[in-house]
């Protein structure tokens, strides 16, 4: 027990964690400390190492070099104690589709050493909380994707974990179910003081987290709150939609040489110059309209997004890593 | 490393085994085609090989009826083998679908995962064998309480051992196709060369050696000794000990492979 009290303050801590598959390094000396009750997002494109980090934290892989403590317990030395205090939802569904909702949840309870009336009461409470009590006797394969996700999370909360890990929780569910899911998550955080860690490649999900760990090619490139991250890029982003995008792009690159101008999703994005004020952005917008007004269908002045932050931090586009990992590099 | 730490949780071992074992059985019973396939295949084999092919093997003093009887223990072994294959193929599916991941990060020792799988395979194969045994009793099988006990005990060991072999093959694999290849390469020959189809004594020397080296041969002879006393040369204690040791070794190997061999999850 002595060893456990040392790291008790933080819900999760990672120090100098590296991991490699054979010769290929996927995590390179990653460190971060998570405070209790925080909602943490791990953000990174495919191939950034976030899935490997998640598997290490979920105790699926043996920990290599570096130190991990989970819910105050050192992993792997105190793996069993840590596992009891963690709820884990993997990206791929862990429910047995041939079993009913209730059978699946009871099974989970048994795996975590719960039984009898205590277990029965918890199952009832949780299924009610997640609005699934009517479906308790139904086979999982008859549920919708969103309902299955709800059962997954209910299942992970059964043993009242202190730390909840969710890997890409919104994958494969519709927008309504996604909104529901995040509402549940916030409620849990508020009511139970649960520490939650979520991996995601969706930037709008990342915005909702208390703190973000941004990974790029196995390295930690940021560990900050979303608002502080956005503050890294002062100023506003201008976006233009137009049928004559190439002409405008060509002219602008001569006109505003030195500024970052690129195409994103069929729009032309102009990144702010350094030390830019809102007035500067407004003036730029006005001059754009003056010059190209006839050709422009839409002009937006927006706050920098996490996408912009990612670009700023890593020097490359968030999504371009996806194509790179498929071997079709566009850089 | 991880294995030593996970076995700290001793309290949840029994409960973990129980819940995983129960899932195996419930899943089997819910998939009707699995029940039909598991029971139907050996019966078809028994009929075709035992009565159809058997008559063309007729040599010396043995009649086709005798071959029918000779083949019966081998058919029970086939039921056990099929059941073992089906229950360990699900290991690969569980890994692909994510069920296994959730089990592996739960505070149950890895040995509970192995124990549940082996006991599940054993339960299903013994139940099916007993059903066929009941069907075959009126055809003139020897019956006494002693022989019944020996049949059940042997079937239990064979069920554990064959599920264990299937487990060893399935654990490192990530595709069902890979398993099928190994099944044809290893498991079917293991059955063919166990003395299930023909007695080793009538075979050529090298074939006899192979059969005697096959651990399943000893279990099979125990079944034969129980069902047709006098027709088997088995020394019960020696053959029993060999079967028991083999089962224990396979079970141990399954625990070790689960601890040591880490397979990439999808």
Image (cartoon, coloured by chain):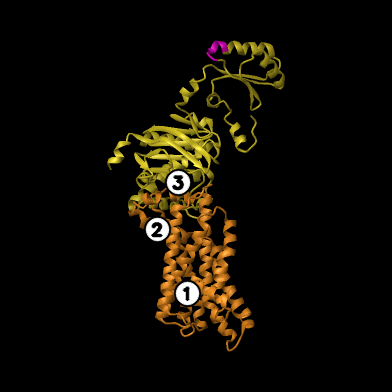
Same chain, labels 2 and 1: yes
Residue B45 picture location, percent across and down: 59, 73
Neighbor class of circle 2 (other Cα within 10 Å; few <14, some 14-19, many 20+) is: many
Stretch in magenta: A274-280
Q: Is residue A276 magenta?
A: yes
Relative to A31, residue A277 above or below:
above
The reply to whether residue A130 is in sight is no
Front: mark 2 or 1: 1
User: Looking at the colours in the rendered structure, which chain would you say is drawn in yellow?
Assistant: A
Relative placement, left or right, of A80 versus B45 is left
Relative placement, left or right, of A29 versus A272 is left
**Residue identified by numbered label 2:** B17
Q: Is residue A175 magenta?
A: no
Q: Chain of mark 3?
A: A
Same chain, labels 2 and 3: no
Front-lying residue, B181 or A84: B181
Neighbor class of circle 3 (other Cα within 10 Å; few <14, some 14-19, many 20+) is: many
Residue reaching furthest left? A2
**Residue identified by numbered label 3:** A60
Neighbor class of circle 1 (other Cα within 10 Å; few <14, some 14-19, many 20+) is: many
Q: Are marks 2 and 3 in contact (CB under 8 Å)?
A: no
Q: Residue at x 59, y 86 (%)?
A: B63
The local secondary structure at tag 3 comes to loop
Mark 2 and mark 1 lie on one chain; the one further toward the N terminus is 2
Q: Are marks 3 and 1 in contact (CB under 8 Å)?
A: no
| Mark seen at residue B218 | 1
Cα separation between marks 3 and 1: 39 Å
Q: Are marks 2 and 1 in contact (CB under 8 Å)?
A: no
Front-lying residue, A307 or B208: B208
Residue reaching furthest bottom? B61
The reply to whether residue A1 is in sight is yes
């Amino acid at each position: 027990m002595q060893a456990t009290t040392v790291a008790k303050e933080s819900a999760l801590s990672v120090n100098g964690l590296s991991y490699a598959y054979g010769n290929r390094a996927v995590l390179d000396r990653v460190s971060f400390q998570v405070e209790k009750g925080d909602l943490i997002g791990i953000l990174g494109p495919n191939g950034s190492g976030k899935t490997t980090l998640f598997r290490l934290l979920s105790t699926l892989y043996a920990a290599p070099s570096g130190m991990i403590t989970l819910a105050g317990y050192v992993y792997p030395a105190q793996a069993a104690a840590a596992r009891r205090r963690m709820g884990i939802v993997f990206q791929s569904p862990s429910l047995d589709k041939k079993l009913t909702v209730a059978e699946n949840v009871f099974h989970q309870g048994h795996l975590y050493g719960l039984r009898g009336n205590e277990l029965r009461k918890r199952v009832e409470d949780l299924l009610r909380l997640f609005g699934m009590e009517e479906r308790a006797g139904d086979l999982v394969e008859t549920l919708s994707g969103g309902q299955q996700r709800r059962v997954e999370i209910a299942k992970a909360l059964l043993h009242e974990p202190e730390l909840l890990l969710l890997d890409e929780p919104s994958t494969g569910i519709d927008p309504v179910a996604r909104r529901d899911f995040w509402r549940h998550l916030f409620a849990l955080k508020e009511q139970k003081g649960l520490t939650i860690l979520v991996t995601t490649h969706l930037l709008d999900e990342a915005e909702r987290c208390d703190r973000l760990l941004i990974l790029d090619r196995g390295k930690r490139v940021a560990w900050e709150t979303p608002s502080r991250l956005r503050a890294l890029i002062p100023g506003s982003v201008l976006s233009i939609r137009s049928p004559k995008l190439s002409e405008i792009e060509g002219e602008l690159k001569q006109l505003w040489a030195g500024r970052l101008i690129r195409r994103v999703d069929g729009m032309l994005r102009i990144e702010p110059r350094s030390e830019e004020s809102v007035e500067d952005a407004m003036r730029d917008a006005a001059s754009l309209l003056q010059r190209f007004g006839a050709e422009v269908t839409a002009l937006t002045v927006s706050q920098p997004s996490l996408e912009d932050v990612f670009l700023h931090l890593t020097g490359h586009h968030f999504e371009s890593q996806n194509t790179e990992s498929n071997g079709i590099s566009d850089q | 490393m991880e294995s030593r730490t996970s076995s700290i949780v001793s309290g949840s071992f029994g409960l973990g085994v129980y819940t995983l074992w129960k899932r195996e059985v419930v899943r089997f019973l819910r998939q009707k085609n699995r029940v039909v396939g598991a029971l139907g295949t050996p019966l078809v084999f028994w009929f075709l090989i035992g009565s159809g092919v058997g008559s063309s093997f007729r040599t010396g003093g043995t009649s086709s009826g005798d071959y029918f009887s000779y083949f019966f223990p081998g058919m029970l072994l086939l039921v056990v083998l099929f059941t073992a294959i089906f229950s360990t193929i699900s290991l690969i599916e569980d890994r692909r679908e994510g069920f296994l991941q959730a089990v592996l990060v739960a505070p149950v020792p890895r040995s509970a995962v192995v124990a549940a799988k082996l006991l599940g395979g054993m339960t299903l194969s013994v139940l099916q064998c007993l059903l066929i045994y009941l069907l075959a009793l009126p055809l003139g099988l020897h019956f006494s309480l002693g022989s019944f006990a020996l049949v059940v005990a042997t079937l239990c060991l064979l069920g554990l051992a064959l599920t264990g072999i299937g487990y060893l093959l399935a654990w490192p694999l990530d595709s069902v196709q890979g398993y099928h290849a190994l099944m044809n390469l290893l498991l079917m020959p293991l059955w063919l060369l166990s003395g299930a189809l023909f007695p080793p004594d009538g075979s050529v020397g090298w074939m006899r050696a192979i059969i005697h080296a096959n651990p399943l041969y000893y279990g099979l002879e125990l079944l034969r000794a129980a069902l047709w006393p006098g027709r088997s040369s088995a020394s019960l204690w020696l053959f029993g000990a060999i079967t028991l040791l083999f089962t224990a070794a396979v079970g141990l190997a399954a625990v070790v492979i689960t601890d040591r061999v880490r397979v990439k999850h999808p």
